[in-house]
Image (tube, rainbow, N blue to C red):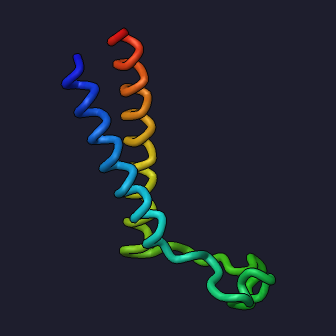
Amino acid sequence: MAQVKNALVIIEAVLALLLMAGVLVQTPKASGLGGTIGGGDGGLGGGYRTRRGLERQIYWTTWVLVVAFLVCSLANIWVGAHLQ
């Protein structure tokens, strides 16, 4: 059971790094100062635009990583509780 705990910790660390990279790679909806004030592309949404292509793939991959990290964290807690 200790080997499973160690493997879960390593997997969780790798998922955390991938998740951070996935969040940092994404482009913000409204870039620059104009987007933060409410300008941007002149649309009613402030800076809203749809995700397409690679941007959409990165977005959904990040969500998959979020779910995987959550499951791994819960499994890590469960294994830790049963080790004692």
Image-based side of 67 in relation to 30, left or right = left
Residue 76, percent across and down? Answer: 37, 27
Q: How many marks?
A: 0
Residue 32, percent across and down? Answer: 66, 88
Q: In this view, does 51 lie above or below 17?
A: below
Residue 11, percent across and down? Answer: 28, 41
Q: Residue at x 29, y 33 (%)?
A: 8
Q: Residue at x 30, y 50 (%)?
A: 14
- Residue 52 occupies quadrant: bottom left
- Residue 38 occupies quadrant: bottom right
Q: Is residue 15 above or below residue 60?
A: above
The N terminus, quarter of image = top left
Q: Which residue is drawn at 34% across and 46% down?
A: 13
Q: In the depicted view, which residue is nearer to us: 43 or 73?
A: 73
Image-based side of 8 in relation to 62, left or right = left
Q: In the depicted view, which residue is nearer to us: 23 or 11?
A: 11
Q: In this view, does 75 lie above or below 72?
A: above
Q: Residue at x 45, y 52 (%)?
A: 63
Q: In this view, does 58 lie above or below 82?
A: below
Residue 59, percent across and down? Answer: 45, 63
The C terminus, quarter of image = top left
